[in-house]
Amino acid sequence: MCGIAGKSDWSGAGVDTVLTVSGMCGVMSHRGPDNQGVKDLGNIVLGHRRLSIIDLSEKANQPMSSADGRYTIVYNGEVYNFREIRKDLEKEGYRFNTNSDTEVIICAFDKYGTDCFRKFNGMFALAVWDSQLQELILARDRFGKKPLHYFFGRDNNISFASEIKAFKTDESIPLDISFEALNCYLAIGYILAPMTIYKNVYKLEAAHYLKISGSGKNVSKVRYWDYSETFAVKNKDSEDDTCSKILFLLEESVKRRMISDVPVGAFLSGGIDSTSIAALMKKYHKGELHTFSVGFNQKSYNELPDADRAAEVIGTHHHGIICDIKDEIDFINNAVDIFDEPFADNSLIPMIEVSKLASEYVTVVLSGDGADEIFAGYITYKADRYYSYAKPIPDSIKKFFINLNLTGGNKKKLNWQYKQKQFLNGTLHSPEKAHYLWRQFFPPEDRVNILGEKYRELVFDSDPFYTFQRFYDNAKDLQPLDRNLYVDGMTWLTDDILVKVDRTTMHSSIEARCPYLDPELVEYVSSIPVDRKMNNFRLKYILKKALKDTVPEFVINKKKSGFNSPVGAWIGADGIDEFRSFNKYVYDRKFS
């Protein structure tokens, strides 16, 4: 796990470019406190910050070049099947000087070219420089677990980095605010790729690679994996066989993600996702397994008792911490800087805390992230199903209930009055728009009020729903639940959940791994018939059945509880208005 950066100068990189890349790496020291490497390759300078996980020797430091010197790589992430790929490459005559996955990746690129990205089971953001063709390749893993940003400047030169803050060290890069990105943030609480908060800085989309050649004049972007295609063909396995296959694939995924030369632990909330990961880790972990959780003084938000109970049954050495109001206002302020751009997922606050706690004991943590997105674990999927029953109700009746003032004075996570209003509002629109609206913060008119009347046209013309609609159109032949799972995977998962996991863990210099997002597991789950994912409104039906002998029964039967913070209690909002207030608070903190 690391941070990468680079900058081209097609007229020949000099001292200034080297110093710039060194500065870019320096501000990302938290991503890689163990080593910094910068290499001048003629027309480009590559930089790297290393967090040593596999092969801790200096030989595994980066930038790393191939044996013949043609290719040089900087790489952030882990490829868990590197040993299998290495064996195949050794049969082809390749020889290795390290035990690192980095060397395997560069040899795989030499052998397979960009086809290698489909062979990698893991998370990665990387840059490979081909000195023979004078060509740069930037690539990102299937779900974008590892970040990669880029900027095209004068004379077709490109700069890239793991974090946006790295661009601030280069005075030649204009950092003008993108109001399209602000509009997206105010609508859904995060910024969809390829946008960033700055007009000319972009995120490389998940499952894509970018090829730059011809002194920067030739640029092509290619999607090497299409998640929607994995839903097309449904398997015919029996329910019992499906459960066995899920458990087998999840167990294999966990074992892969335990490969490390440094201590490994797990986040444990007491829910089915994190508990299943911890339980399977315990089966193979040598010695004491450390697990970590975070809670709150507000009872409806506090999951520490559930985590303690699960840890006791599994047999882990558990550590818990309470987030308290006296500390968390500072954390809200710090979070703005940690995330580089507006980000209103309020669970980032406990994630910062629990990551800091985990860093005192381990360098790698496994988490349950991704399970809800592939197995249909969110209440929004129930709302999608209820949509067809509510759609025929006259709009006038729905609007009457929507306009009732029923949302005040409730400190629970999501009070039923708010859910009712959000649901009814969604049924005024198409099924796709309704699914999008379940998670909307500010509607267009509110966004106009915040940004200003002069941005009215921009607010409506750049509505983030258009991006969602493009994903829906890409999956128009899929069943409704699968379409929503696909769209959530390409938006909510990639640009919110995984951003939160990466930034908070890397801020404390630890690596987070997500077994539920193993490509083999994801593609198999996509092929499962929809009525096994959500059976008669029972969410994650097949996963719960598959794990009935792996996790305690009280975990299986536990009511779904989102990982949220009591922001309303902290900053004075009421009920669900806490989420909207938090969104506005971060906006004001950064841009007012």
Image (spheres, rainbow, N blue to C red):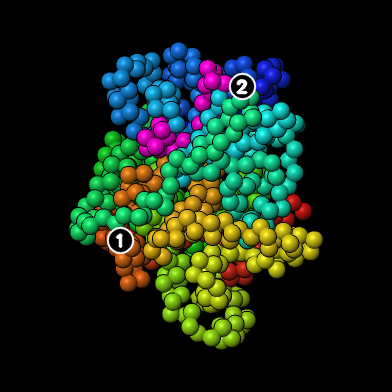
Residue nearer the viewer, 207 or 83: 207
Q: Residue at x 56, y 70 (%)?
A: 411
Tell me the magenta residue range.
115-134
Q: Residue at x 50, y 85 (%)?
A: 393
Q: Which disc is residue 147 wearing?
A: none
Residue 491 rendering spot, x and y as whole percentages: 52, 53
Q: Secondary structure at mark 2?
A: strand
Q: Residue at x 34, y 33 (%)?
A: 81
Residue corresponding to mark 1: 529
Residue corresponding to mark 2: 45
Residue nearer the viewer, 252 or 235: 235
Residue 285 is left or right of residue 204, and the answer is left
Q: Secondary structure at mark 1?
A: loop
Amino acid, disc 1: Pro
Residue 41 rendering spot, x and y as whole percentages: 59, 17
Amino acid, disc 2: Val
Residue 424 is left or right of residue 122, and the answer is right
Residue 501 rendering spot, x and y as whole percentages: 50, 46
